[in-house]
């Protein structure tokens, strides 16, 4: 036993950690009667390694009051062995503490352990009436309490963030904004670590190994109540609900209308200093070729792509006509949709096309990647990303049995990528640009999570996620459009804001401000593919329609999410703004095709 574990020792009480069968106890009302308790209990008790343990002892001397006796303090901690406390401190083996006369001792705390290591302990207090420093069992009187110390289990907890996320010094798995606008962290750790960190927290769930959690939000608080009737909701903050990802819970929540994010199994990687804030925001000036590229973006082209991806018009795949009725991750039609994307990208100049296959939580899919290699800094990568999969919440088969056109969610983002890629492939850039079409987004950003995990170590400097960019019925001039970043209590927000401010600046610089009123939302909305990059400390921003006051909520995830509900001039303006932002991030260097 380590001495530093012993907080207080009363010399008039013997504390022994010993095996239960070591002594033969003798009990009599007129003979000495020691008593020992752990946390006010006779035991045996079970505690976790993070639970404080208080040991109290008392003695009734009986008719031996005033008589001299051997006092013992012997410790046996399985599996470490035997220890005794003597006048010289702790030592190995079984040795007497000394000889002292017996007297009445009221319950007194002799040890206080803030925590004990995992194992089994037996605490004894004993005296024998033959004071010769030998253990004389026939005249030994003792009591015992046993304590089993189990591992301190991990818990999922909500932790308040008074200043910066990084100040918590805890394993953070997500940062969310609740229904009252309060930013908080989701942490998986032990109660001991939470207490040691001195944070304000609320335990949401005991967290056995390999537990997966879904973070779900729908924008409609009434849906939270419906979810609670259908699944075991662990926590409802007024905006987000948290559930264990088991069985078909993801499908049930999708039925109700929730967007899903599978919480990262690993702690997210946090920025360690605000001095590491990425690129400096220099005075914004037009770059070669950007105005020309913007001018080549035509509303008819964007519309045609959305029409083809949402099943309004046929496409040609491997020489055969085909109508893409849905793009569900687990259905057969998604394979046709991914082939369509591959074919389109392969026909573009300078474009290298690859497929990234993934499997996660009973789902599998393919992400399609088109890449334009940078001419000066090819190892520096700018990403434009959109999700190809769609979902119809009324499709009980979850394999694409019903139409899921997903015109806004997210054929609009995919159309933007195809349009931008086709034009940008005719120009040169300092850095590499990747156009990524993911699957599995509707099941919790599964495809993007898998992709980010597989490109660890690559120098991805910026990500622009385009997801739902085509719905606006507000009548405002210009209509509102959002770009989302991490919360300002997360130092990663500084890098995201470089992207968001550049996007907003580009809108003004290239005369798009008559079509878009860009509003930056620092709300850490994790429902999009950009969150997979945030989890790995990669700067990213989400380009999206007005998802507060004029969101396409009634149509999304239904058969009603069709081309004829969209505002195509609004959508096209966002395609232009995103292309220009990506061109600035990658460093456009040519005014015409290279």
Image (cartoon, rainbow, N blue to C red):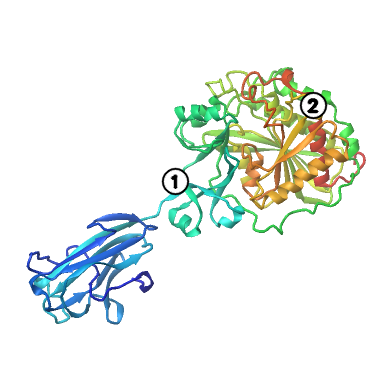
Label 2–label 1 contact, CB within 8 A: no
How many residues crowd around disc 1 within 10 Å: few (fewer than 14), some, or many (20 or more)? some
Identify the mark at residue 302; answer none if there is no mark: 2
Q: Residue at x 72, y 50 (%)?
A: 495
Taking the image as shown, residue 361 lies to the left or right of residue 47, namely right
Q: Quadrant of the N terminus?
A: bottom left
Among the two numbered marks 2 and 1 on one chain, the one whose residue lies closer to the N terminus: 1
Q: Quadrant of the C terminus?
A: top right
> Which of the 4 image quadrants contains residue 53?
bottom left
Closer to viewer: mark 2 or mark 1: 1
Taking the image as shown, residue 468 lies to the left or right of residue 23, namely right
Real-space CA distance between mark 2 and mark 1, rounded to the nearest whole angstrom: 46 Å
* Place of residue 218 in the rendered image (x, y in percent of width and height, measured from the top left): 58, 30
Q: Is residue 451 visible?
A: no
Q: How many marks?
A: 2
Report helix, strand or loop for mark 2. helix
How many residues crowd around disc 2 within 10 Å: few (fewer than 14), some, or many (20 or more)? many
Report helix, strand or loop for mark 1. loop
Q: Residue at x 27, y 60 (%)?
A: 38
Task: Report which residue position mark 1 lands on.
Answer: 207
* Place of residue 198 in the rendered image (x, y in percent of width and height, measured from the top left): 50, 58
* Place of residue 404 in the rendered image (x, y in percent of width and height, measured from the top left): 63, 21
Q: Residue at x 83, y 45 (%)?
A: 584
Q: Is residue 219 visible?
A: yes
* Place of residue 355 in the rendered image (x, y in percent of width and height, measured from the top left): 68, 37
């Amino acid at each position: 036993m380590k001495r530093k574990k012993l907080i207080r020792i009363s010399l008039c009480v013997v504390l022994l950690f010993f095996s239960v069968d070591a002594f033969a106890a003798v009990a009599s009302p007129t003979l000495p009667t020691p008593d020992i308790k752990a946390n006010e209990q006779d035991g045996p008790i079970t505690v976790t390694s993070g639970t404080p343990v208080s040991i109290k002892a008392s003695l009734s001397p009986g008719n031996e009051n005033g008589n001299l006796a051997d006092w013992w303090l012997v410790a046996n901690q399985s599996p470490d062995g035997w220890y005794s406390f003597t006048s010289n401190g702790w030592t190995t083996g079984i040795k007497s503490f000394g000889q002292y006369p017996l007297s009445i001792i009221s319950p007194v705390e002799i040890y206080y352990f803030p925590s004990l290591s995992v194992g089994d302990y037996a605490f004894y207090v004993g005296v024998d009436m033959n004071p010769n420093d030998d253990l004389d069992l026939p005249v030994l009187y003792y009591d015992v309490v046993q304590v089993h110390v189990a591992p301190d289990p991990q818990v999922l907890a909500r932790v308040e963030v008074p200043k910066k996320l990084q100040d918590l010094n805890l394993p953070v798995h997500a940062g969310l904004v609740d229904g009252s606008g309060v930013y908080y962290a989701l942490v998986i750790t032990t109660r001991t670590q939470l207490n040691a960190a001195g944070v304000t927290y609320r335990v949401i769930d005991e967290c056995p190994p390999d537990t997966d959690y879904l973070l779900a939000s729908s924008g409609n608080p009434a849906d939270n109540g419906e979810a609670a009737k259908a699944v075991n909701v662990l926590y409802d903050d007024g905006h987000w609900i948290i559930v264990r990802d088991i069985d078909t819970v993801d499908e049930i929540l999708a039925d109700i209308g929730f967007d899903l994010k599978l919480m990262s199994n690993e702690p997210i990687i946090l920025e360690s200093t605000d001095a590491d804030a990425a690129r400096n925001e220099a005075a914004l000036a037009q770059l070669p070729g950007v105005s020309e590229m913007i001018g080549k973006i035509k509303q008819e082209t964007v519309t045609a792509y959305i029409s083809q991806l949402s099943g309004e018009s046929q496409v040609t795949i491997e020489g055969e006509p085909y109508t893409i009725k849905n793009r569900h991750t687990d259905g057969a039609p998604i394979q046709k949709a991914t082939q369509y994307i591959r074919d389109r990208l392969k026909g573009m100049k300078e474009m290298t096309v690859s497929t990234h296959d993934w499997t996660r939580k009973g789902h599998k899919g393919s992400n399609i990647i088109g890449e334009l290699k940078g001419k000066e800094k090819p190892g520096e990568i700018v990403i434009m990303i959109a999700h190809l999969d769609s979902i119809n919440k009324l499709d009980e088969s979850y394999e694409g049995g019903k139409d899921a056109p997903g015109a806004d969610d997210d054929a609009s983002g995919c159309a933007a990528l195809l349009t931008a890629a086709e034009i940008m492939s005719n120009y040169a850039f300092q850095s590499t640009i990747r156009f990524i079409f993911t699957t599995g987004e509707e099941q919790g950003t599964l495809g993007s999570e898998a992709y980010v995990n597989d490109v660890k170590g690559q120098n991805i400097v910026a990500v622009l996620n385009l997801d739902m960019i085509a719905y606006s019925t507000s009548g405002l001039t210009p209509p509102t459009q959002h770009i989302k970043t991490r919360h300002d209590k997360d130092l990663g927000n500084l890098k995201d804001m470089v992207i968001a401010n550049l996007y907003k600046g580009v809108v003004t610089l290239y005369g798009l401000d008559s079509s878009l009123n860009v509003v930056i939302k620092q709300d850490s909305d994790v429902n999009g593919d950009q969150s997979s990059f945030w989890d790995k400390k990669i700067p990213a921003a989400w380009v999206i329609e007005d998802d507060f006051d004029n969101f396409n909520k009634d149509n999304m995830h239904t058969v009603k999410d069709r081309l004829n509900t969209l505002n195509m001039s609004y959508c096209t303006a966002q395609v232009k703004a995103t292309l220009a932002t990506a061109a600035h991030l990658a460093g456009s260097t040519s005014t015409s095709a290279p």
